[in-house]
Amino acid sequence: MQSSITVTEKVTAEAPAAITLLGTEKLAEMPGVHLDDRLRLVPGFSLFRRTSSLVANPTTQGVSLRGIGSTGASRSLLLWDGVPLNSPFGGWIYWNRVSPDEVEEVEISRGATTAVFGDKAMGGAIALFSPAARGGFTAGIEGGNLGQVGARGAAAMPLGARFAATARVRFFSMDGYFLVPEGSRGAVDTKANSRFASGQARLDYTGGKDRLFVRLDTLAEERDNGTQLQHNSTGAGTLAAQYQREAGSSGSLALTAFHSREEYRASFSAIGAGRQTERLTSLQSVPSEAAGLSGLVRGGGTRGSWVAGGDFQRVEGYSREALFPAGSRIGGGVQTQGGFFGQGDVALRSLRLYGGLRGHETGNGFFWSPSGGASVGFENVRVRASAYRAFRAPSLNELYREFRVGNTVTLANSALEAETLSAVEAGADAVWGRRSLRFTVFRNALEALITRQRQNAGAALNRGVEAGWREQWRAWTLDAAWLLADSRFAAGERVPQVAKHQGSATLAWSRGATFAAGGLRASSLQFEDDRNQFVLPGYAVWHLMGRQRIAGGVWFEFAMENAFNREVLAGYSPTPLLASPRLVRAGISFTSK
């Protein structure tokens, strides 16, 4: 759990971190089928590659914040109501498990400024919060170019005075697009696409001081990965429960438990000269499961607050391969991790001091993660600074799974060590009426960094600045943000898949039942590889979207991404690979009162 910085009429000093809060209305104003497409408008948020989770292989969907995350394994933790969503085997994320329409708030905390989170939160944490269970029904249907078809529905029903049940389903299919540019395309190339169905059933109990939810969510998806023989599919599900009890005005107890199962299946091939022939090299099946338990206690008073607790997780997974023309390979094992933590803050007039400590056993070492900071809050301005040390243990995927992208093979390495990060940051937040500004400078030093080639690369240094600006005038709102992240290995090469500059700007107009917005998302060049031989040029893509209420709870919705159909280079295999072309969607949604 993470303290929030709530910026309304004044700035409060609740955490020494740069935190972005996105509510239901803000999420609805962002274009994108999946949540990752919408969050990409937040500079510093990116996946391993420039491709969207719409058609990309799930193993490339690891989250990076502030340029910390140059492999498919996330160096940032994603939580859904306190339950981890990172894949137990590889750390990547299936973004289609959560519909943007079933999220009440997203909280993005950059940096490991709190001791509450352990492994996988080295770059920060993203917390998703579900809306409170209310009676009613919602439904929506949409369609678009490239064969996009989607439908969703949700129903909530009170069961007496204290219980409520919620059910949600979502379907999506897309014919897709060619990953290889037309000039390099051959007979083996087909469209990359995806099809999935996800569902959720949840039971909530709300008493006087007690709250409890039990949730089951499932996902079934399949994808064609751009050639005749390369495909992947996944089945996944999580059973989770959380109990909370309030104690007085500031005390609380929270207990969370979960069990996840997942099986990822994929086929790999070797591409012949001119992309005219293709040969199957392996069929891979990766079953995994995870179980975890966490608990924390909060307390405090008018002068300060504290939180203490612990967590435990066990992960088991295996990579099983059938090799062609003959042979087999298997690798995997069990990871057991656990930790304990304490975090507190105290107010001395306008100055607030923070301190925290986590002790964590990763399975290949014990780590201490201290954190500390200070903030000074005034009516309209808050100045903050923090320093911390964090870590990440290698995933089972990095330790044991070999894979191929085109003709490039990435080997497993069971001798990988845990990564560590030491960081400092400082910044300020300010609000004047309907205008706000956020500014942060940071320095991250990484040791034993695991690169895409599954090697511990020694050390890397990540320095940068991030800034955000919001201006509101009558019915207009301008949001602009920028990130500078200069991330380099000790020898001087740039860390792959990390752009030095990222930025976005959106201008929105809203009045009554009408909303319209347009803007751009831009990135400077970045490198595909550790040696900086393959350059991915910079780009800028534009988006448009709008909503219009037709009658009652019926809305017409429209969205366009990459409006000018800019060709964006996303990688090499070694053939150039493309990110999403222009995507256009329109649909109707209904919400009962």
Image (tube, rainbow, N blue to C red):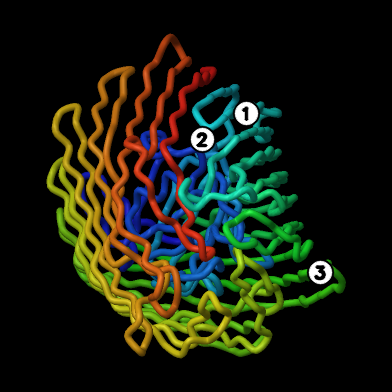
Question: How far, Cα to Cα, is label 2 from label 3?
Answer: 42 Å
Question: How far, Cα to Cα, is label 1 from label 3?
Answer: 43 Å
Residue 233, placed above or below residue 414: above
Q: Are marks 2 and 1 in contact (CB under 8 Å)?
A: yes
Residue shown at 28% from the left, 76% from the top:
463
Q: Are marks 2 and 3 in contact (CB under 8 Å)?
A: no
Element carrying mark 1: strand
Indicate the amino acid at tag 2: Asp
Residue shown at 57% from the left, 66% from the top:
296
For the residue pair 344 and 37, the one nearer the viewer reads as 37
- Res. 154 mark: 1
- Res. 228 mark: none
The residue carrying pointer 3 sits among few (fewer than 14), some (14 to 19) or many (20 or more) residues within 10 Å by Cα, namely some
Which mark is first along the chain, 1 or 2? 2
Residue 7, placed above or below residue 513: below
Indicate the amino acid at tag 3: Leu
Residue 84, placed above or below residue 568: below
The residue carrying pointer 1 sits among few (fewer than 14), some (14 to 19) or many (20 or more) residues within 10 Å by Cα, namely many
Q: Is residue 270 visible?
A: yes
Residue 432, placed above or below residue 289: above
The residue carrying pointer 2 sits among few (fewer than 14), some (14 to 19) or many (20 or more) residues within 10 Å by Cα, namely some
Question: Which residue position is annotated with label 2?
Answer: 101
For the residue pair 422 and 448, the one nearer the viewer reads as 448
Question: Which residue position is annotated with label 3?
Answer: 323
Q: Position of residue 221 (x, y in %)?
A: 69, 44
Residue shown at 38% from the left, 45% from the top:
22
Q: Is residue 461 left or right of residue 266?
A: left
Element carrying mark 2: helix
Q: Position of residue 137 (x, y in %)?
A: 60, 22
Q: Is residue 139 left or right of residue 510?
A: right
